[in-house]
Image (cartoon, helix red, strand yellow):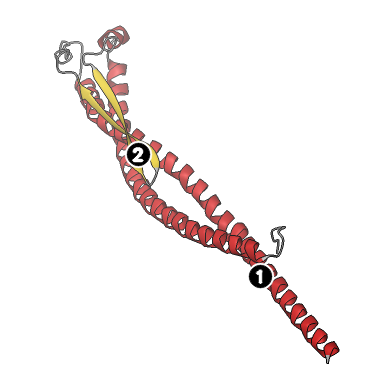
Amino acid sequence: MARLDVKPTRMELSKLKDRLAISTRGHKLLKDKQDELMRQFILLIRENNELRSAVEQELTEAMRAFVVAKSLLNEAFIEELFAVPNTTVSLDIQEKNIMSVIVPQMNFTVDESVIEPEMQYGFLNSNSELDQAIERIKTILPKLLKLSEIEKTCQLMADEIEKTRRRVNALEYLKIPELKETIYYIEMKLEENERANITRIMKVKDMGQ
């Protein structure tokens, strides 16, 4: 096993033991952080999967109704109907801290001061499928925004989990074993020197007798 290239002195031994204590404590803190990140990540993934499934189903139904409506109506009428939005929506993005990971918190609001009346179109030019498509798309918007927030949060947390995992592994499998091996080597060297000194002292005593 690799060890640090240091002089086998008591001062170096003391420094290395301090570094080992700090590394061990840092490893524990990072491992706890990794475990908590994983716990929250799993919860978010479950929420994301449930919401995505619901959104995809609603979008499919809305688009199916819209395709049917479009096939039965004049294309110029459809384009004119959706050419100009009848509401103004603002997006407010805040930041939230999850275990030192800065993630977005999105909120959207409809500006009541500039809101226009509901879409107006004649019964002769429209059909029930168009009504259903418009209504469903309106209800999907908040869920789509929430889904984008959760997916971005999952992405950022996954990146942080990977970085934390690499740091944990570096400490657990490289740094801490390296420090332990070096400490063991210095302790053995110091004991060896101590025995050598005792042997020399005993020889000097024997020679003096």
Quick check: 92 above or below 162?
Answer: above
Q: Nearer the viewer, residue 102 or 10?
A: 10
Mark sitting earlier along the chain (1/2)? 2
Foreground of the two, 54 or 155: 155
Q: Which residue is mark 2?
A: 150
* 59 relative to 122, above or below: below
Q: Is residue 10 left or right of residue 79?
A: right
199 is higher (above) or lower (below) than 32? below
Q: Residue at x 37, y 37 (%)?
A: 103
Q: Amino acid at mark 2?
A: Ile
The residue positioned 69% from the left and 61% from the top of the image is 3
Element at label 2? helix
Image quadrant where one finds the N terminus:
bottom right
Density class for disc 1 (Cα within 10 Å; few <14, some 14-19, many ≥20) is some
Residue 175 lies, with reference to residue 143, above or below; the image says: below
Give the quadrant of residue 138. top left
The x, y position of residue 100, in whole percent, is 39, 44
Find numbered disc 1 in the image and state the secondary structure of the residue it sits on. helix
Q: Is residue 158 left or right of residue 175?
A: left
Measured as percent of width and height from the top left, residue 23 is found at 53, 58
Q: Closer to the camera, 208 or 195?
A: 208
Mark nearer the viewer, 1 or 2:
1
At label 1, the amino acid type is Tyr
* Residue behind mark 1: 184
Which of the 4 image quadrants contains residue 50? top left
Q: In the visual, does 169 lie left or right of 194? A: left
